[in-house]
Amino acid sequence: MKLTSSNQPVYKIPLKYRKMENLHIVFWLFKDVAWCMFWKPLGIAMIIPTLLISVIISWRTKQYMSELCHNLAITVWISANSYWMISEFLGFDTQPLFAGFTFKHLALIPFTIGILILTFYYLIWKPKHKDEMETM
């Protein structure tokens, strides 16, 4: 992070990274539109680029804990969302698992991991590193 002439921190993203992030949004939207329209091949195919770019973005932002935590949360969110979509596409989402839970509810595992990552960042890491420049 750099400081501006007014000593305000500036977080710059290289253009090639920004283009990748924007393409990530396109893939994500196609995946979710395919899910909504029940276009199985497209929805399943879009998991790969959406998830892959999410992992790359997380890796590229690892030097900033705020970015890393939020990007990892997005990655597990996409994982949960993709599993849920597949469970609906393949028709096992409503199959009983145990104690009133269905196979769709297994998506709660990565969703919870994302919440735990952000809980760690906001309640543990950030309060202990108040003087470090972060993006959040």
Image (cartoon, grey):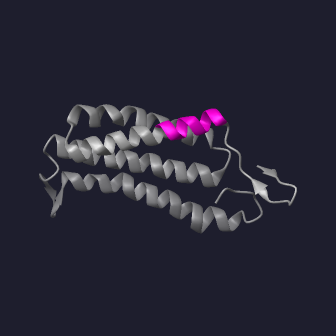
How many numbered discs sit on the rendered protein?
0
Which SS does the magenta portion mostly show? helix
- Residue in view at x 21 percent, y 36 percent: 40
- Residue in view at x 45 percent, y 55 percent: 114
Image quadrant assignment for residue 29? top left
**Where is residue 96 drawn, in percent x and y?**
12, 55
- Residue in view at x 45 percent, y 45 percent: 75
**Where is residue 88 drawn, in percent x and y?**
18, 46
Looking at the image, residue 93 lies above or below residue 23: below
Whether residue 94 appears in magenta in the rendering, the answer is: no
Image quadrant assignment for residue 135? bottom right
- Residue 74 placement, left or right of 87: right
**Where is residue 58 drawn, in percent x and y?**
55, 42
- Residue in view at x 22 percent, y 53 percent: 104
Looking at the image, residue 87 lies above or below residue 125: above
- Residue 109 placement, left or right of 132: left
**Where is residue 126 drawn, in percent x and y?**
65, 64
Whether residue 16 appears in magenta in the rendering, the answer is: yes
Q: In the depicted view, which residue is nearer to us: 123 or 16?
A: 16
Q: In the depicted view, which residue is nearer to us: 50 or 27?
A: 27
Start-end of magenta stretch? 15-23
- Residue 20 placement, left or right of 99: right
- Residue 50 placement, left or right of 67: left
Task: Assign the C terminus to one quadrant of the image.
Answer: bottom right
